[in-house]
Amino acid sequence: MKKGELVRLLIIGIWVAIVLLLCSCKTKYVSVPEYHTEYVSQLRIDTLRDSVYHRDSVFVEVKGDTVFKTKFKMKERVTIRHALRVDTLIKNDSVRVPYPVERALTKKEQFYMSTGKNAIRISGVATLVLLALIAFKKRKFLFNIIKKF
């Protein structure tokens, strides 16, 4: 294997690793309502009265030798009711809370996931093998660097 081919394979392997690392699945968040309920009660008292008033009057009026007698009768009915009422107000408040959406993968998606995992493994092993080959060919240079430390 020539030096130029080895460098080319190393560069291609690095590019493949970078592309595979940048292509990934993202978590999708969907908002779900969270409900808050508040009850407000108010007590109201209504009054009911039922009354009947009888009023009568007799007017006597004298004009000369004539006496006028006028009777006036009035019947009045007043109705007022007492009632106890409870008014309840219900306030529903919904707040959106994000949560991740999870679903079962289809067979096609499972195949893509397993293929992607295997491609990442293969590119990682290939990168390690290429680095080992380069280190093996340049071992004298590397040993000299290590000896200096």
Image (cartoon, helix red, strand yellow):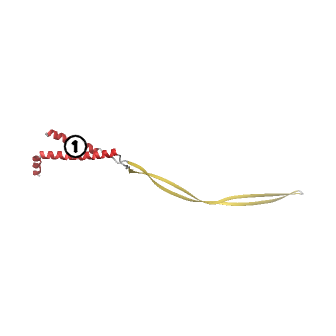
Q: In this view, does 92 lie to the left or right of 73?
A: left
Q: Which corner quadrant holds the N terminus?
A: top left
Residue 43: give x, y in percent of width and height.
Answer: 57, 60
Q: In this view, does 32 lie to the left or right of 117?
A: right
Q: Is residue 43 left or right of residue 140?
A: right
User: Splitting the image into 4 quarters, where does residue 72 fall?
Assistant: bottom right
Residue 83: give x, y in percent of width and height.
Answer: 62, 60
- 127 or 138, nearer to the observer: 127
- 108 or 130, nearer to the observer: 108
SS type, badge 1: helix
What's the amino acid at mark 1? Answer: Ile
Residue 96: give x, y in percent of width and height.
Answer: 43, 51
Q: Residue at x 54, y 58 (%)?
A: 41
Callout 1 crowding tier (Cα within 10 Å): few <14, some 14–19, many ≥20:
some
Position above or below: 74 against 1: below
Q: Residue at x 30, y 46 (%)?
A: 113
Disc tally is 1
From the image, tell me which residue sits under label 1.
Answer: 14
Q: Which residue is drawn at 20% across and 41% down?
A: 11
Q: Residue furthest front?
A: 107
